[in-house]
């Protein structure tokens, strides 16, 4: 059966990764969370003290890029891929608020994007991939057969993220999460290199009041229509 490329873009906490994982499992495709890759580079920058008071030492980060190795490894018992930064499993650390607050500045550096986009394109060279992020349908896979653009209100997204963090044991206020989401929306959509925007041929899905099941059914129908003509 012919395989296609599915690109899922959108604002943070719109459920991109949940949908991408559901699709990858159903279709037996590879799932790649491109945001995790930017998060790993942000973690590297934090660990190496390249960020001070929200100011990034861009020159030093660029000079370090040859030493930053980001790779996914499949964990059989979790039945999911985990992210490794220079051979160390950083899957949990990259979700912390400290990393969330630093990642947009790191993701705005063109050299960082160039390195990660090249890696993402290699991962998708054989199709049969579902990748989520901010520039997947616009920059990484402009020829993807199916492009989705996910949205939901900032309040709905902050509530989801807050519940996720609290259930994972993090102590955080709802207002801090909402602030992080709105400031990342702004930074991601206004940065010069590869800003977040809906590709002309992307299908918008607002899931503020759409159940996971209904969303999945809707998207699966889109996938099937693309597979029929692929
Ligand atoms: O999807 P996420 O929230 O884990 O992404 C973390 C950050 O990485 C997000 O604020 C923007 C950036 N990002 C990006 O610039 N391009 C991508 N393809 C994916 C994420």
Image: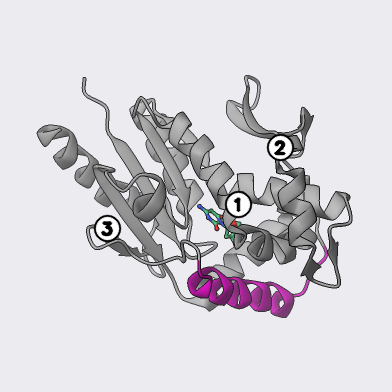
Q: Point out the image quarter for the C terminus.
A: top left
The answer to whether the residue labelled 2 contacts the one labelled 1, judged by CB atoms less than 8 Å apart, is: no
**Residue 111, numbered circle:** 1
CA gap, disc 2 and disc 1: 11 Å
Residue appearing at x 52%, y 76% in the figure: 154
Residue 162: percent from left, percent from top:
67, 66
- Magenta range: 171-192
User: Who's the residue at 62% across and 19% down the image?
Assistant: 76
Q: Position of residue 139 (x, y in %)?
A: 39, 52
Left or right of 160 on screen, residue 92: right
Compare marks 3 and 1 and give the one earlier in the sequence: 1
Separation (CA) of disc 2 from disc 3: 34 Å
Can residue 166 be seen here?
no
Q: Residues within 10 Å of mark 1 (few under 14, many from 20)?
A: some
Toward the viewer: 58 or 80? 58
Under circle 1, the secondary element is helix
Magenta-drawn stretch contains 219 = no
Q: How many marks?
A: 3
Decide which of 41, 65 is in the foreground and name it. Answer: 65
Residue 35 percent location from the top left of the image: 58, 50
Residue shown at the point (30%, 61%) measured from the top left: 199
């Amino acid at each position: 059966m012919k395989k296609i490329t599915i690109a899922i873009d959108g604002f943070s906490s719109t459920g991109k990764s949940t949908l991408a994982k559901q699709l990858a499992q159903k279709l037996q495709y590879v799932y790649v969370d491109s945001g995790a890759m930017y998060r790993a580079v942000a973690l590297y920058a934090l660990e190496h003290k390249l960020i001070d008071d929200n100011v990034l030492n861009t020159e030093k980060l660029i000079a370090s890029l040859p030493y930053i190795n980001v790779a996914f490894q499949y964990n059989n018992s979790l039945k999911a891929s985990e992210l490794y930064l220079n051979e160390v499993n950083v899957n949990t650390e990259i979700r912390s608020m400290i990393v969330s607050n630093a990642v947009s500045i790191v993701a705005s550096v063109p050299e960082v994007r160039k390195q990660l986009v090249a890696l993402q394109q290699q991962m998708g060279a054989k199709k049969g991939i579902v990748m989520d992020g901010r520039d997947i349908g616009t920059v990484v896979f402009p020829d993807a057969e199916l492009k989705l653009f996910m949205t939901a209100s900032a309040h709905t997204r902050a509530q989801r993220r807050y519940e996720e963090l609290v259930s994972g044991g993090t102590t955080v206020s709802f207002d801090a999460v909402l602030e992080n989401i709105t400031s990342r929306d702004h930074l991601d959509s206004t940065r010069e290199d590869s800003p977040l925007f809906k590709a002309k041929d992307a299908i918008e899905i607002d899931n503020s009041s759409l159940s996971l099941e209904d969303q999945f059914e809707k998207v699966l129908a889109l996938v099937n229509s693309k597979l029929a003509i692929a």
